[in-house]
Image (tube, rainbow, N blue to C red):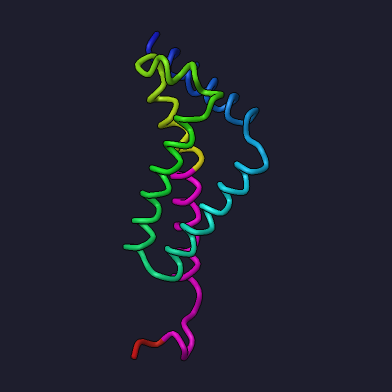
Amino acid sequence: MQILDNTLAIIYRALSISLNLIGPVSLLLYLALMCLIYLAYYKRGLRLGSFVHIMGCIFFFFIVWNHPGYRWYKMRPWNGGYVYTLVMIVVYVYLPMKLVMFGTELWRNLTPKGKSDKPR
């Protein structure tokens, strides 16, 4: 039970620190990355979208890991640093894009197809 409590404490600390340190430039970069991933999925298909999604996750990992506000985690990686970085990537990159992609696919499947959507 102690391991679960420690893990939840690390997750809570990670989210509280990240919300305090996000700035306008970081927010614009984040939104641009999300738009790029979504456009790659929507316009070019699953293969390119998945590739851009993975590259975005790697890019975001290095942004989080090299940020000066997270020095404590970088100096003690086995004391929650890797868990923290994983939480950041899952919460800010993976889950939002998966929810948007699920919504897009649901919308595509539920809307009636017109004449322009027929295969040639």
Q: Main secondary structure of the magenta part?
A: helix
Expressed as whole percent of the image width and height from the top left, the position of residue 5 reads 45, 13
The location of residue 27, given as percent across then percent down, is 62, 44
Where does the image place residue 68, in percent across and percent down from the top left?
54, 25
For this view, does 18 lie left or right of residue 55?
right
**Residue at 46% of width from left, 70% of height from top?**
108
* Above/below status of 89 relative to 70: below
Of residues 50 and 1, the one drawn nearer to the viewer in this rendering: 50
111 drawn magenta: yes
Vertical comparison of 98 with 15: above or below: below
Residue at 50% in and 47% down: 96
How many numbered tags mark residues here? 0
Q: Residue furthest right?
A: 24
Q: Is residue 1 visible?
A: no
Q: Measuring 40% from the left and 8% from the top, which residue is drawn there?
A: 2
From what the image shows, is residue 47 above or below residue 12? Answer: below
Residue 116 visible in the shown view: yes
Quarter of the picture containing the N terminus is: top left
- The residue drawn where x is 51% and y is 52% is 33
Given residues 102 and 44, the one toward you in this image is 44
Q: Does residue 33 show up magenta in the picture? A: no
Pick the quarter of the image with the C terminus: bottom left
105 and 81: which is toward the camera:
81
Q: Quadrant of residue 40?
A: bottom left
The correct choice, above or below, for 51 with respect to 17 in the image is below
Q: Position of residue 64 (x, y in %)?
A: 48, 33
Nearer to the camera, 59 or 106: 59
Q: Which residues are magenta?
A: 93-117
